[in-house]
């Protein structure tokens, strides 16, 4: 049949951790050359993560043709915590927590984010949390 109708191949599905670390480190360094403010750098990483998240969702939707569209926030977050996290990081995130202050805010908790594993930041950026990239996803 038509190649367009064939499912998207799954491929190996893994990226070497050292390759990811190198690319992510370069991404942080590149973003760092554009600003010296921690909040702006984290926003930039979050924006890049958002773009990656959109593309990952596109791939998942194409691969899983029978996937139903979730409309409830908790179900969407659960999908991200399990399915999306496994695709991106090889494992599910640790948990989903609801904010005590704002009942409409939830956080996906990852106790050991791969983005923070091999990153060293200069003293002037010691408040930088590179997991802002993951938050963007």
Image (cartoon, rainbow, N blue to C red):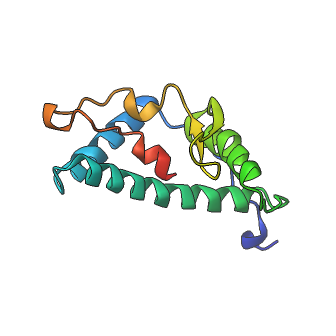
Is residue 101 shown left or right of residue 129? right
Where the N terminus falls, by quadrant?
bottom right
Q: Nearer the viewer, residue 121 or 22?
A: 121
Which residue corresponds to the image point at 55% horizontal and 31% vertical from the top-left? 110
Give percent across and percent down for residue 35: 18, 54
Give percent across and percent down for residue 79: 72, 47
Q: Is residue 12 above or below residue 42?
A: above
Within the image, what quadrant is residue 109 found in? top right
Q: Is residue 110 above or below residue 134?
A: above
Across the whole image, how many numbered discs are drawn on residues?
A: 0
Give percent across and percent down for residue 117: 39, 26
Which residue corresponds to the image point at 78% horizontal and 70% vertical from the top-left? 5
Which residue corresponds to the image point at 76% horizontal and 50% vertical from the top-left? 75
Q: Nearer the viewer, residue 106 or 16?
A: 106
Q: Is residue 13 visible?
A: no
Q: Is residue 31 visible?
A: yes
């Amino acid at each position: 049949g038509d190649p367009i109708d064939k499912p998207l191949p799954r491929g190996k599905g893994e990226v070497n951790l050292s390759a990811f670390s190198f690319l992510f480190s370069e991404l942080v360094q590149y973003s760092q050359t554009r600003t010296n403010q921690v909040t702006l750098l984290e926003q930039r990483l979050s924006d890049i993560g958002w773009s990656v998240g959109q593309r990952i969702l596109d791939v998942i939707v194409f691969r899983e043709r029978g996937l139903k569209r979730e409309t409830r926030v908790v179900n969407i977050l659960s999908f991200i915590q399990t399915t999306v996290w496994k695709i991106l990081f090889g494992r599910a995130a640790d948990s989903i927590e609801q904010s005590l202050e704002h009942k409409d805010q939830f956080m996906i908790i990852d106790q050991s984010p791969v983005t923070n594993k091999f990153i060293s930041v200069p003293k002037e950026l010691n408040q930088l949390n590179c997991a802002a990239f993951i938050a963007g996803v």
